[in-house]
Image (cartoon, helix red, strand yellow):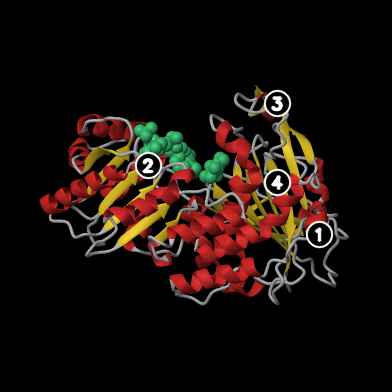
Amino acid sequence: MEASTFVLFGATGDLAKRKIYPALYNLYVDGKFSTPFSVIGLGRRELSNETFRAQVLQSLHSFSRRAALDSLQLQAFLQGFEYSVLDVGHPEDYTKLLKHVREREALLGLPENRMFYLSVGPEFFEPIAANIQASGLGDTLGWKRLIIEKPFGRDLKSARALNTSLTEAFKEEEIFRIDHYLGKPMVQNLEVLKYSNPVLRALWQNRYIANVQITASETVGVEERAGYYDKSGALRDMFQNHMLQLLMMTAMQLPKGSTPEEVRSKKKHVVKSLRPLIKEDVALNVVRGQYTPGEVEGRAVAGYTSEPGIDRSSQTETFIAARLWIDDPLWNEVPIYIRTGKRMKQKSTRIVIEFKEPFNDSHNKNKGDHTPNLLIIEISPDEAITLQLNTKDPQQHGELTSVHANYQSGSSSDVPEAYENLIFDALRGDATFFAHWDEVELSWQWVQPILEASEEGLLPLQAYRSGSHGPDGSAALLGGTEWWLDSEDKTNEAAPSVPDAPAIIRTGA
Ligand SMILES: NC(=O)C1=CN([C@@H]2O[C@H](COP(=O)(O)OP(=O)(O)OC[C@H]3O[C@@H](n4cnc5c(N)ncnc54)[C@H](OP(=O)(O)O)[C@@H]3O)[C@@H](O)[C@H]2O)C=CC1
Ligand SMILES: O=C1O[C@H](COP(=O)(O)O)[C@@H](O)[C@H](O)[C@H]1O
C-alpha cells in the first residue's frame, strides 16, 4: 500500500473516538498501515498535538478490540498524529491546512497521496468537498480520495443534489461511501460462501428458495442521538442503506474472482430489479412501528416518545419491515422479507434462507409438520453459519427431525472490525465494499414511495412493546409463513446457538 496523509474532519467527534482511531491502531499493529504515516485531525476546538494524542490514546483504551496495548508501538503510532483547528465554513482554515499537510509530507518524505475522511454532520459534506478543491488541497501529484459517512441525503432529491456537488470536486472512483455493514466480516464472506460451495451455489435461486429473511434487530433505543434520529427514523437510518446493501450482497450472483467493478455492477442489477412500490399500495408491503415502554434484557425501558429529546407526538418509526420482490429470472416469485428495529428482544443481524419443501415427499411422516431446510447466516454480534437439514429420528418412529451443520467464528477480539476492513480497503483504493452512487440512487428511488406514503399518512405507525419482535403487522406481512426467530424463543428454533458445536448436532441434544 502506498503511504499517504489521512486528513480527518471531525477528529474530536464520537465516531472518530469509537471507531476510527481503534481501526487505525489495529491496522498499524497488523502491519497494514504503511509507515511513515501522517494523520491530521481537524475540529473547531483548540487542541495542542499533545492533548489530541492523549484523546486518541484514551479512545484506544476505551474502544480498541485489543485488550493489551504495547507501549512502544503505541508511542510510535501516536507520533503520526497532529491536530489543526478548522471551521468547515472558513476558507482560510483550508489554506492553513494545506500548509500543514505539505510540511508533514516534506518532513516525512510522503508522496502526495491524500485521504480526506468526513466524519462530520452531513450538512458539512458539500462545503468541505468544495473547499478541498478551492484551496488546492485536492491538487495532488499522487491520488486523492474522499471517505464519506452516512447519511447520504435524506431522500432521492437531496441525495442527487449532494452527489452532483461532490462530483464537482471528486470523481466517482475517488469517492468511498461508507456503509459499515459492508465492512462486517460475515457480509464480506457472503460471496465466498456462495462461490466456493457448489452445493449452495446450485441452490441459490428461485427453484429451491422459498423466501429470504433479513433482520437487523437492536436492543438499544434512540440513545443520545435524538436530534438526528427523530428526523431520520429506521427507514433512512438503517433500511435505505444497510438493509438494502445486505439484500444486494445476498442476491447478487458472481463468477469466482470477480473484480470490484463486476461486484458493483451485479449489486446494481439487484437493486435495479426490485419491483417498484406504488405509493398507494405501500401499506400492503411495508410496516412501520414505534416502540412503547417495555422490558429489554431484564430492564424496564421507556417508550420512544418519552425518550429525552424526542417530541412527545413524534411519528418517527423505530421499526420497519418490508416485503420485496426481485424481478429477475433467478429470483422471480421469491419474497424477500426485511425488517429492522430498535428496542427489540434481541441484538441480532442475520440472513435466513428458507428452502422450498419437496413437491412429493413420500418420506415425510410428519405430514408437513416439520421445519424446512434453512441456511442461517449470523452477521453480528455473533458470527455463525448454520445449515438446518431434516433426518429420520429412529426414536420417534422415523419422523423427521432437524439437525444442524454449524460453524461459529472465533472470539470477537480476533476478528477485524468493520471500520478496519473498510479503511484498509479505501487506503488501498479497493472500492468493492463501498456503496457506488448508482446503488445509493437506486436505493433511494425504491424507498421514495415509502417516504411519501409515510408523510401523507398512508402508512400508519403501529405500536410495539419494547423487548418484543416488533409490531403484529410485521408477522402478517409474511402471509402464512413466519419470521425465523432466535434460539431463545421457543416458538421457533431456527438457529440453536451452541458454543463449540460439533459439525452436526441434533436439535435439543
Ligand atoms: N457516531 C456514530 O456512531 C456514527 C456516526 N455516523 C456519522 O458520522 C458523522 C460524525 O458523527 P459523530 O462523530 O457521531 O458526530 P459528533 O457530533 O460526535 O462529532 C462531530 C464532529 O464534527 C466537528 N464539527 C462540528 N461542527 C464543525 C464545524 N463547523 N467545523 C469543523 N468541524 C466541526 C466536531 O468538532 P468540533 O466540535 O471541535 O468542531 C466533531 O469533531 C456523521 O455524519 C454521522 O451521521 C455514522 C455512523 C455511526
Ligand atoms: O448505522 C447505524 O447502525 C447502528 C447499528 O449498527 P450495528 O453494527 O450495531 O448493527 C444503529 O444503531 C444506528 O442507529 C445506525 O445509525
Observer-side mark, 3 or 2, equals 2
- Residue at numbered disc 1: 398
- Look at the image and tell me whether residue 163 can be seen: yes
Pick whichever of labels 3 and 2 is earlier in the sequence. Answer: 2
Categorize mark 4 by other alpha carbons within 10 Å: few (<14), some (14-19), many (20+): many
Disc 2, SS: loop
Residue at left offset 68%, top offset 56%: 448
Give the amino acid type for the residue marked by disc 1 in the picture.
Answer: Gly
Q: Separation of disc 4 and disc 1 at Cα?
A: 42 Å
Q: Separation of disc 2 and disc 4 at Cα?
A: 36 Å
- Residue at numbered disc 3: 312
Q: Quadrant of ligand 1?
A: top left
Pick whichever of labels 4 and 1 is earlier in the sequence. Answer: 4
Pick whichever of labels 1 and 2 is earlier in the sequence. Answer: 2
User: In terms of depth relative to the viewer, which is nearer, 14 or 448?
Assistant: 448
Snapshot quadrant of residue 234: top right
Residue at left offset 24%, top offset 34%: 53
- Where in the figure is residue 268, as x and y percent of width and height? 57, 69
Tell me if residue 10 comes above or below residue 138 in the rendering: above
Give the amino acid type for the residue marked by disc 3 in the picture.
Answer: Arg
Snapshot quadrant of residue 471: top right
Disc 4, SS: strand
Disc 3, SS: loop
Q: Separation of disc 1 and disc 2 at Cα?
A: 73 Å
The answer to whether the residue labelled 3 contacts the one labelled 2, judged by CB atoms less than 8 Å apart, is no
- Residue at numbered disc 2: 89
For residue 168, side relative to residue 326 (left or right): left
Observer-side mark, 3 or 1, equals 3
Observer-side mark, 2 or 4, equals 2
Snapshot quadrant of residue 51: top left
